[in-house]
Amino acid sequence: MRITGGKLKGRIIKCPDGVIRPAMDRMRESVFAILGDLTGKSWLDLFSGSGTIAIEAVSRGANDVELCEKDKIKINTVLENVSITETECDTKIKCHFMPVEYFIKRCKRDFDYIFFDPPFPYKFHEQLILEADKKDILKETGTILVHRPEEHFMPETIGRLTRTDQRIYGRSIVDFYSYKDQTK
């Protein structure tokens, strides 16, 4: 896998052992192009896998980045991958190794962007977004992005969040959710 843009463009990222479905380069490049410059923004990468999405965010300017991955087999590879952001971008990615559901329940802060990329068989997308909304971990002007398979339906509205955009990449879809009136 490689970083598709920003300061770390072209850098190769290791793929960890265990089950992984890395986000396609084309999809990552497109999503980050839609979001634009992330300078000064906060980012949360959930179901992080290799850490690539968090690294892409730092590469494109985000300077307050956290990730969460529960698979203990991936820890060493994730830590090695994210270390390049500290040495080359002067930004340390804070890593949490626990189930995403537990992380959301414990989270005490909010983010500009939250990227959900669960395994494709995962069935609790809507419930997880609803929990994130209830816990106020998304800033009022923020966006939740959900990467999912086309066969998994997502509603237009979840809690106080409304789908504002949707992009299709083969059998993958990325939904963008934001607060309806951008105020809570």
Image: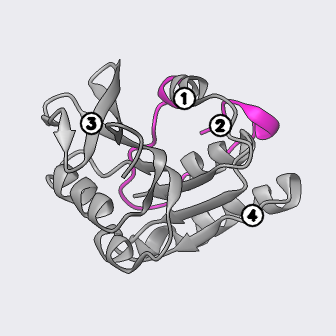
The segment highlighted magenta reads 1-28
Label 3 secondary element: strand
Residue 82 in the image, given as x and y percentages of width and height: 68, 60
Residue 81, percent from left and from top: 67, 58
Q: Earlier in the sequence, mark 4 or mark 3?
A: 4
* Magenta span main SS: loop
**Residue 164 seen:** yes
Which residue corresponds to mark 4? 83
Mark 3 lies on residue: 162
Q: In front here: 71 or 162?
A: 162
**Marks 3 and 2 close (CB-CB < 8 Å):** no
Q: Position of residue 32 (x, y in %)?
A: 58, 31
Comparing labels 3 and 2, the label whose residue is closer to the camera:
3
Residue 56 versus residue 80 in the image, above or below? above
In whole angstroms, how far apart are the C-alphas of marks 2 and 4?
15 Å
* Residue at the spot of label 2: 2
Q: For the residue marked with disc 3, what is the amino acid? A: Thr
**Amino acid beneath label 2:** Arg
Which residue position is annotated with label 1? 25
Say what secondary structure mark 2 lies in: loop
Q: Quadrant of residue 155?
A: top left
Q: Which residue is found at the position 40% from the left and 61% from the top?
A: 18
Tags 4 and 3 touching, CB below 8 Å: no
The reply to whether discs 1 and 4 touch (Cβ–Cβ < 8 Å) is: no
Q: Is residue 17 magenta?
A: yes
Within 10 Å of the Cα at label 2, are there few (<14), some (14-19), or many (20+) other Cα atoms? some
> Residue at the spot x=35%, y=56% of the render?
19
The answer to the question of whether label 2 and label 1 lie on touching residues, with beta carbons closer than 8 A, is yes
Work out how far the residue at label 4 is from the one at label 3, CA to CA, in angstroms: 35 Å
Distance of label 2 from label 1 (alpha carbons): 7 Å
Residue 20 drawn above or below residue 168: below
| Residue depicted at x 45% and y 38% | 23
